[in-house]
Amino acid sequence: MKKLLVVCLLFVSVFSNAQQTDYVDFRRAEALLVFNQLAVDSTTYNSYEIDFKILKPTDSIYIDAVNMKFKHVALDNSTATFKNDGKRLIVFNDFKPNESYKLSFVFNNAPKKAMYFIGWEHEGKNQIWTQGQGKYTSNWLPSLDDTNDKIEFDLKFLAPKKYEVISNGILKSKSDNLSNILWEYDMQKPMSSYLVAVAVGVYNKKTETSKSGIPLEYYYYPEDSLKVEPTYRYSKQMFDFLEEEIGFSYPWQNYKQVPVHDFLYAGMENTSCTIFSDAFMVDDIGFNDKSYVNVNAHELAHQWFGDLVTATSGEHHWLQEGFATYYALLAERDIFGDNHYYFKLYESAVDLGRQDLAGEGTSLLNAKSSSLTFYQRGAWVLHALRGLVGDDVFKKAVKAYLDKHQFKNVKTSDFIKEVERFYGKSLNTFVDVWIKQKDFPVDAAFGLLQNESTFINEYLMVDCQAKTSKCEEYLKYYVSDEAKVKVISQMPELVTSDTFKHGFKVRQAISQYVRQIPKAIKEDYETLLDDKSYVTIENALYNLWTAFPEERAKYLSKTRNVVGFNDKNVRLLWIALNLNTPFYQADNKQGLFEELVGYTDERYNADLRMNAFNYLNLMDACNDTCKSNLEKAKSHHNWRMVKFAKEMSEKLENKK
């Protein structure tokens, strides 16, 4: 007992003064995980084996493993001395430098985060999916929470036959095992543990092949076959573009994209296997309002910037998010053109300037910076840097940076050194202004935009807050649709019948900003209900219903079959308006009310539920079923749903 206590104290001493990566290099992990209908409460044990090499003498090594149980822990096939402290599996031994070892064990996990079991009680809607970044893979798979230790993960999964199992790497084999299927995935290169992923669900798959021969796999729910093309539109084009633009071949064996229910974020760039929110599964109309293109490009760019080269710490997080944001913008520029690209940069510069005015700006090297800083300021750094050093130097530096640091970890100085090497000059002043200083250099950013884009110059010229006489002319003639939107947002009273003849963006702006509808444009306004835009239809329906009570039945009849996005935005508004139109008797009012209440049930996605709760709250109609579902929402895995449920519960209490 005394000896074990001494060993434990030595362990604490060694690893409090140095990272484990200084003492041990974990090389390859192989695991088998078993999924079944009792997934959350399962007593099933999974197997695990990991190879590692000792770099310096040490008497212990550890693997992060949260709330797990272990059996048959062995070191090189001999029983090992170990400790399970609830957070780590600690193995004790007289480890010798330059020697390799194999650790094996079986483990039981019942994860409370990082692995999510969605709708497991609803037949046909069951999913399992993971989210390692910020939640830690060690909650479901023994691994390393330190991003600086990269491991080759080869995973096997046993799951019921009706489910697809998608994970990192290439599917090496798939074999029957009684009522289950054994799925075996193979990775050939190492990655940080937070990028390990698995998704289990009922899916179909569409495949394409990139210009360079990489298999591209697009997963979708069987009922979403008509959403596949709009959702994954431009995927291959963006993949081919980024390979050429970055100048470094895609580093993994294949690339998969998997939508999941109530994902925590828009998407996550797991190595070779992006998981994204199924809210981005859209039809042809939805594509016009809320496409997956930007998220698609962003997560794809991460396969190089974040997955291939990974920041050593939060201080250098922009090397992942800023690069992914910048290269996603370049991919969108290839699709939508220069004006789109520069307008996105303009919008982000405005947001960053506002952040500074609010006193919330930070250096890009502050580990506690906002997402706006890491993503958008990071992208701006790359745009400004490329403008300074030129395309040729920039592209050579990026390629050299990836070549030198592939499958390794990086700091900001690693990238800057490569740029300086090709540029032949110091970048200290640039780094001080664009990266290190607290405030975003908003004046310099606007100067770059004005020098590079006549489109932005025109947009900045158009400003109707001073109510100038030119504003009416702007809506008639030469300025861009973006500039016309700006005019409409500032002076909606200037909209005439001619304004409706402009494009999608202008018509959507009319629906958003023209809420008091003059009779002179009533007929034109009604045409917005025919637009290929769920946002426009939703806005126009509400505004028309409000402005012309005597014609409410006409507007309801016109839009009765429009559903909208996955959150049923148009359908929910339509139900609410119908219930508040007493003389419109085309539907069973009680049936519609029950439909609205039904959408608060936990089997629906979080956005739809929140919309339904909001309408019921506005109508003072949250009945016992609604309140019961609201209470259940407080234990939802998605923090947005939890926050919403708690806040709405407080509002209901205050109404009593």
Image: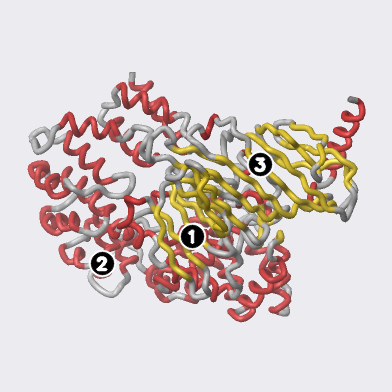
What residue is shown at x 66% (from left), y 41% (from top)? Answer: 47
Which residue is nearer to you in this view: 31 or 625? Answer: 31
Mark 1: amino acid: Ser
Disc 1 to disc 2, C-alpha distance: 24 Å
Q: Quadrant of residue 526?
A: bottom left
Whether residue 313 is visible here, answered yes or no, is yes
Task: Mark 2 vs mark 3: give the one in front.
Answer: 3
Q: Residue 520's spot in the image, x, y percent?
A: 11, 57
Q: Quadrant of residue 33?
A: top right
Disc 1 to disc 3, C-alpha distance: 47 Å
Residues at badges 1 and 2 in contact (C-beta under 8 Å)? no
Which residue is nearer to you in this view: 251 or 435? Answer: 251
Task: Mark 1 vs mark 2: give the one in front.
Answer: 2
According to the image, label 1 marks what residue? 348
According to the image, label 3 marks what residue? 47
According to the image, label 2 marks what residue? 503
What residue is shown at x 68% (from left), y 38% (from top)? Answer: 106
Mark 2: amino acid: Gly
- Answer few, some or many: residues within 10 Å of disc 3's Cα (few below 14, many 20 plus, some between 14 and 19): some
Mark 3: amino acid: Ser
Q: Is residue 150 above or below residue 497?
A: above
Disc 2 to disc 3, C-alpha distance: 59 Å
Q: Residue 596's spot in the image, x, y percent?
A: 26, 34
Which residue is nearer to you in this view: 433 or 151? Answer: 151
State which tag comes first along the sequence, 1 or 2: 1
What element does badge 2 sit on?
loop
Q: Residue 473's spot in the image, x, y percent?
A: 24, 70
